Every structure is written in C-alpha cells, then in structure tokens.
Image (cartoon, rainbow, N blue to C red):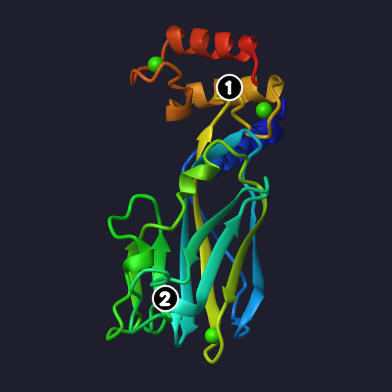
C-alpha cells in the first residue's frame, strides 16, 4: 500500500496552517511615489493584503517613511478594502499654534508607525530641529480600531496629499501590520469552508500533538479535544 501521497498532502496542509494562523502579518507597498505639491488629490498608494478567508481584523498599524520638507502640508488617509476611510494625519500643527507659524509643522520627514497603542499624538509630534521631524510610534488622528472586525483581504489604499504651495515630497516606504483573529477555529485549512479536509487536518495535528489540535486549550491531547473539535465542526461557522 502506498501511503506517501496522503502523508505529503497532510504535511502540506499543516505547513499552510502554520503560516495562516492568526498573528501579525506585514504587507508593504511598492513605493517611491512622488507627492505633488499643492494638490488636494495627492497620490494613491495601494497595498494588497491576502490572508485566509476565516480571519478578521484584530488590529492594524501603518508604518510610513516619507521625505518631505514641510510635514505641516500633508494629509494622509487609509482606506480598507471594505471602504472604511480614516484620517491618519491632517496638516499637523494646523489649526492649533503650529510651528513655526500658521503654516503647521515646519519640520522635515516622517519615519513613524501610526498605532492606537502609541502614547504621543502624531498631530502634535512635530520636532522642527530633528530629522525626521516625526519619528517612532505615534497615535493617528482617527483611531485605527475603526477597521476591527473587517475582512482584511483585498486592496488597501493610502492617500498622501500636499495641501499647500512650495514644498513637496516622496513616499519612500509604506507597510501595513495586520493582526487577525480566526473566526472559525474548526476551519483548520483556513479557506472558509468546513469539510473532510478539516477533519483530516485535525486528526493529523492531534496525532502529532500539534498545539492547534489542543482544542480545549488545556495543554493535553485527549478525547476532550476530539469532542470539542467535533462539536465546533457540527455547529458550523458564520
Ligand atoms: Ca507644499
Ligand atoms: Ca476548511
Ligand atoms: Ca486539550
């Protein structure tokens, strides 16, 4: 009896499983996009995200590296595949006191990660004598938590616009860090359907004492895990 093919199939499924489980994943754009000066339309930067169909967003962070001589000219937005748009930055320093005057943050450059878990708001992070003038982890103008629960796969769009004359810039790098939750734990193959392949994947993982088969998460592998898997499987998925 030749059992090689099924074993290879299951091994492939399990290695797919290991890389598609819920965790933070990074997706970057091809950049070096010119930001035209004094153009409210700005430049769109697409980022393609591809995760399993049974994953939904737990958190999103946006890392940007932008060369620009007057960061106070910039407006940055982020749109999800679902159509939700949030404003990351809106002419920092305006309409408050700004620096060095009514034209907003007069510093150069952004090398920052916009994240709800930061402690400093990006809108007031201007340090005009330092390069880059915005650095490290910063809180975006609107919370990135707006994306929680959406399906992350598809095209995201970052828009960067320069809303005042004179200075312009370039987007050098743009990356999204997407952390997901698995919405349907018995869908071990992660494609959004429940069928015999998920049962096979469970049995193999159970035989190998792979942590994904510890279905009641007590650290042991026994009939309770089989029972928990089968009831989740019969209950189906949303
Ligand atoms: Ca400008
Ligand atoms: Ca499946
Ligand atoms: Ca267990």
Q: Quadrant of residue 139?
A: bottom left
Q: Secondary structure at mark 2?
A: strand
State whether residue 210 appears in this view: no
Ligand 1 picture quarter: bottom right
State the image coordinates of residue 222 (x, y, percent, origin top left).
Answer: 42, 11
Q: Nearer the viewer, residue 77 or 216?
A: 77
- Mark 1 CB in 8 Å range of ligand 2? yes
Which residue was labeled with disc 2? 110
165 displayed left or right of 115: right
Quadrant housing the C terminus: top right
Depth check: give the residue in front, 30 or 166. 166
Q: Is residue 53 visible?
A: yes
The tag earlier along the polypeptide, 2 or 1, is: 2
The residue lying toward the viewer, choosing from 165 and 146, is 165
Q: Residues within 10 Å of mark 2 (few under 14, many from 20)?
A: many
- Looking at the image, is mark 2 or mark 1 nearer the viewer? 2
The residue identified by callout 1 is 186
């Amino acid at each position: 009896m030749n059992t090689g093919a099924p074993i290879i199939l299951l091994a492939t499924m399990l290695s797919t499983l290991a890389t598609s489980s819920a965790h933070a994943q990074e997706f970057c754009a091809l950049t070096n996009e010119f930001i035209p000066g004094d153009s409210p339309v700005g430049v769109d930067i697409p980022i393609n995200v591809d995760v399993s169909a049974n994953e939904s967003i737990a958190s999103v962070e946006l890392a940007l590296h932008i060369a620009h001589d007057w960061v106070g000219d910039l407006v940055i937005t982020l749109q999800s595949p679902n159509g939700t748009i949030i404003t990351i930055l809106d002419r920092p320093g305006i309409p408050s006191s700004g620096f060095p005057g009514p034209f907003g943050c007069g510093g150069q450059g952004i090398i920052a990660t916009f994240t709800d878990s930061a402690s400093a708001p990006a809108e007031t992070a201007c340090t005009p004598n330092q390069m880059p003038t915005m650095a490290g982890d910063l809180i975006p103008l609107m919370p990135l938590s707006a994306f929680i629960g959406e399906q992350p796969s598809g095209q995201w769009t970052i828009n960067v616009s320069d809303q005042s004359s004179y200075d312009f810039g370039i987007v050098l790098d743009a990356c999204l860090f997407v952390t997901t939750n698995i919405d349907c734990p018995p869908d071990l193959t992660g494609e959004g359907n429940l069928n015999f392949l998920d049962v096979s994947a469970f049995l193999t993982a159970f035989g190998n004492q792979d942590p994904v088969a510890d279905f009641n998460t007590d650290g042991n592998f026994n009939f309770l895990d089989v029972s928990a898997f089968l009831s989740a499987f019969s209950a189906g998925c949303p």
